[in-house]
Image: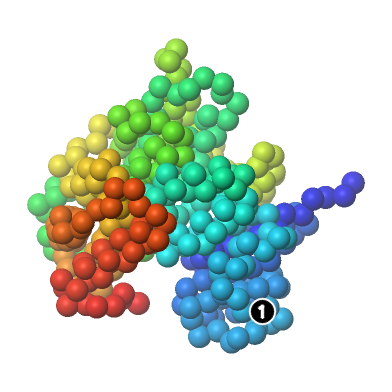
């Protein structure tokens, strides 16, 4: 029986989700072919990936050769629209993923979306582009993936989405006690191993507000029907409530492998002995707590501007990106992050019905505005 090989482009191939996506490809070499690899500045790792997976194309912001290992250098926006490409995995971090994601959707590609910021910035435009191009968006981020999996096969609309949150590195401390925490402390997530940007966003709970905004667009549900609960064990990734009172939950280990593999193989599921498994007998007690919003000022700030729409969500993404970089670079305190983002948003002149270009410009403006207030005119590397 002839097997249908899916051809992939991976955006952000050297990051956390990108490398885990390649782990799935490595486990199923007869199911996938890597057509393109795109990354930021980690040229040595990209070159290793090119040597192993032999893509036809690559794109890099780093010091990679014009042609390497038989792969041809090309702009990422051109690679994602190649006719032979089936799936584009958007595993970049921040607003930089917007142009490539939009390009892929406009020509009908399946987009495996792990980048929260892209849909936070312009959720309505991504959905419109997918509909116009006949494209499909498959969530890879663990919480939206859990909601998606709970909704699969249902014909009734959900009455409520419940997104779980671990609470981040400082979940047992008051906001006032965090004035002197270090980046190293903030990067010690209690349950997940992730890249630095999303780990800091987990500590502020900005990432959970982004997931609320993301879910509002992906599942076409109002903000007031999306709740967040603290679930310390990070085993229940999200839940969906239906009108008859039924509550469906998706459980899994703290691994991105399962949501990545589910998106790549959808609608099938495959055995993968390399992925961790969840044992219901030994996983222990599961707890759920009401979120204390006084511990997470970024959460309400983000939802306030997410609800406003226009280019505010794009500015939110750009300002947060810069504030996290400033904190990681030792330029501001952890507790300065929400104030820094709020100052930028207060100065933003929102466009009510923005284009894609408007959203990109708003995010870039917010990033530069935030950095310049702290005497940094360029992104910290």
- Say which residue appears at 52% left-offset and 62% top-offset: 100
> Which residue ends up furthest to the right in the rendered image?
1
Q: In this view, does 163 lie above or below 84?
A: above
Q: Is residue 105 left or right of residue 328?
A: right
Q: In which quarter of the image is the C terminus?
A: bottom left
Q: Can residue 253 be seen in this view?
A: no
Q: Nearer the viewer, residue 204 or 321?
A: 321
Q: Is residue 225 above or below residue 198?
A: above
Q: Is residue 246 above or below residue 224?
A: above
> Residue 222: x, y in percent?
35, 31
Q: Can residue 3 be seen in this view?
A: yes
Q: In this view, does 114 lie above or below 308?
A: below
> Residue 24: x, y in percent?
64, 56
- Say which residue appears at 71% left-offset and 81% top-offset: 70
Q: Name the residue under label 1.
A: 72
> Residue 305: x, y in percent?
24, 46
Indicate how the structure is coloured in the image: rainbow
Label 1: how many residues lie within 10 Å, few (<14), some (14-19) or many (20+)?
Answer: some
Using the rendered view, name the quadrant where residue 327 is placed.
Answer: bottom left
Using the rendered view, name the quadrant where residue 194 is placed.
Answer: bottom left
């Amino acid at each position: 029986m002839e097997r249908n090989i899916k051809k992939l482009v991976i955006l952000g191939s050297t990051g956390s989700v990108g490398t885990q996506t390649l782990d799935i490809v490595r486990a199923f070499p007869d199911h996938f072919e890597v057509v393109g690899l795109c990354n930021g500045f980690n040229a040595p790792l990209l070159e290793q990936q090119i040597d192993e997976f032999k893509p036809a194309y690559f794109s890099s912001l780093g010091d990679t050769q014009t042609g390497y290992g038989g792969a041809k250098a090309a702009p990422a926006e051109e690679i994602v629209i190649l006719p032979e490409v089936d799936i584009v995995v958007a595993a970049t971090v921040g607003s930089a993923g917007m142009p490539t994601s939009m390009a892929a959707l406009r020509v009908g590609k399946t987009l495996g979306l792990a980048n929260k910021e892209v849909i936070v910035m312009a959720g309505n435009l991504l959905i419109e582009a997918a509909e116009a191009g006949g494209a499909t968006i498959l969530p890879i981020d663990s919480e939206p993936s859990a909601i998606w999996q709970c909704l699969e096969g249902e014909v009734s609309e959900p009455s409520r989405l419940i997104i779980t949150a671990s609470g981040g590195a400082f979940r047992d401390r008051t906001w006032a006690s965090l004035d002197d925490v270090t980046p190293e402390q903030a990067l010690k997530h209690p349950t997940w191993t992730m890249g630095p940007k999303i780990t800091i966003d987990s500590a502020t709970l900005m990432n959970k507000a982004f997931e609320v905004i993301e879910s509002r667009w992906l599942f076409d549900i109002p903000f007031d029907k999306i709740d967040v609960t603290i679930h310390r064990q990070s085993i229940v990734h999200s839940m969906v409530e239906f009108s008859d009172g039924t509550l469906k939950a998706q459980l899994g280990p703290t691994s991105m492998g399962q949501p990545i593999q589910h998106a790549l193989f959808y609608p099938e599921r495959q055995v993968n002995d390399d992925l961790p498994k969840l044992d219901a007998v030994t996983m222990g007690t599961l707890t759920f707590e009401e979120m204390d919003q006084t511990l997470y000022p970024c959460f309400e700030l983000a939802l306030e501007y997410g609800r406003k729409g226009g280019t505010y969500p794009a500015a939110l993404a750009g300002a947060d990106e810069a504030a996290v970089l400033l904190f990681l670079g030792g330029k501001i305190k952890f507790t300065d992050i929400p104030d820094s983002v709020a100052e930028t948003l207060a100065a933003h002149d929102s466009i009510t019905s923005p284009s894609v270009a408007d959203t990109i410009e708003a995010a870039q403006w917010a990033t530069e505005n935030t950095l310049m207030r702290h005497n940094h005119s360029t992104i910290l590397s």
